[in-house]
Amino acid sequence: MKRRRYLLPLVAVVSLAACAPRPVVRDAGAGAWTLYVGLIKTQGYVVGSPLASSGLHRLDHDPPQGAEADLNWTHVGWNTPRISGIAVRSDDPSTMFLASGNGVLRTTDGGVTWRLTTGWEVTEVQDVAVDALRPDEVYLASAYGVWVSKDNGDTWQEYNDGLRRKYTQSIETDSNTPSRVLAATETGIFESTGGAGGWHRVGPAGLNAMDIQQSTLEPDVWLVGAQGGGLWLSRDDGATWRKQEGSGDRSFYGVAINPLDPLQMAATGWDTAVHLTTDGGVTWRRIAGQLPTPNNYEVVFDRNVSGRLWIATVERGVYFTDDFGQTWGNGTLPGTLVFDMLFVPNTARNTAASSAGGGSK
């Protein structure tokens, strides 16, 4: 999943080798999916001071529906200043990839151990994606273009042929077609049908695309948010794109399509509040004033609770709604920037427990 080159905190990128790993804490009372977020603690940070608990975090308890609760977030893996994207293998969710400022991190045991899979030449990684149909194929989007691994992240090769400019903010693999990839770049939406072997632009020219998502239940539907360019929707698998009414020239950094109901979509960004639709994009409404700030980075639909939506605000915490924006519960994490949010099957956590000695391997 993603993100961002805007509003980055004043924290130097530290050497991953110097970051101490954090223990994985288990909790048996969760649903079928677990929410993971990539964050950095920015509020009140003083340059040169020790880095606060930053990096990958896991929500260990789902809030009750329609109510707030004491939420426990567990820090998983290295204490690293920036995790921009999270991805997992569909056939083995214990294998997870993280897009970081220093490259791509990988775990194969649900987060117990991690290693940096990329070399010195790969930096400022914005997003990472795994092909669901060919899960050994892993794609990263970076400030310097797209890189691809055909061996589960062991080795990487640059694939930028056809990209007008290399800066790529978000990358998404097609769940219906192997080796088909769509990328959100600063000059538009680009497509490759050969595993990033050659790119061509689809959609409007000059669009500074920030995030791209495909519908789980209706894979011909794609949603894109743009910096200063509004929302764009395709209903024909990326062949044509239509700007969404009411999105104007606002900046959208995060978009989401409900995996349990394809008619529900959400989008958010800087000074954008939250835009929601329940009719597949026919009409949108802007939700403003219910949250402590109109400035947000990320949005995701819950995989355990139907209709629940999560929003990551800029330094004011994470919030969730069960009534599509009328009321919001506090998901905590104040003072942070959350760059990506992903629901991961609990198979990954079960593997982590076994690897940590909580069960047989």
Image (cartoon, helix red, strand yellow):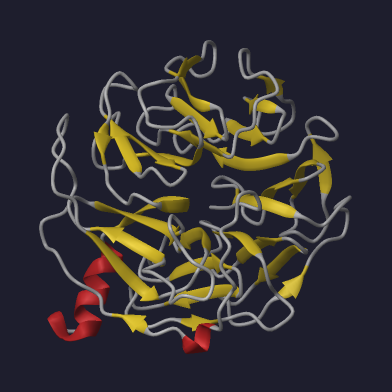
Residue at coordinates 56% horizontally, 67% vertically from top-left?
Answer: 11
Q: Which residue is more in the foreground, 177 or 241?
A: 241
Q: Which residue is more in the foreground, 79 or 181?
A: 79
Q: Which residue is more in the foreground, 216 or 282?
A: 282
| Residue 93 higher or lower than 220, as above or below | below
Q: Quadrant of the C terminus?
A: bottom left
Residue at coordinates 73% horizontally, 61% vertically from top-left?
Answer: 143
| Residue 174 higher or lower than 255, as above or below | below
| Residue 35 higher or lower than 327, as above or below | below
Q: Is residue 262 visible?
A: yes
Q: Which residue is more in the foreground, 54 or 102?
A: 54
Coordinates of residue 120 in the picture (x, y in percent): 70, 83
Coordinates of residue 104 in the picture (x, y in percent): 57, 72
Relative placement, left or right, of 248 versus 198 is left
Count of marks overlaid on the render: 0
Q: Quadrant of residue 73?
A: bottom left
Coordinates of residue 315 in the picture (x, y in percent): 43, 47
Residue positioned most to the left: 29
Coordinates of residue 79 in the picture (x, y in percent): 41, 75
Q: Is residue 359 visible?
A: no
Residue at coordinates 63% horizontally, 80% vertically from top-left?
Answer: 118
Residue at coordinates 41% horizontally, 67% vertically from top-left?
Answer: 54
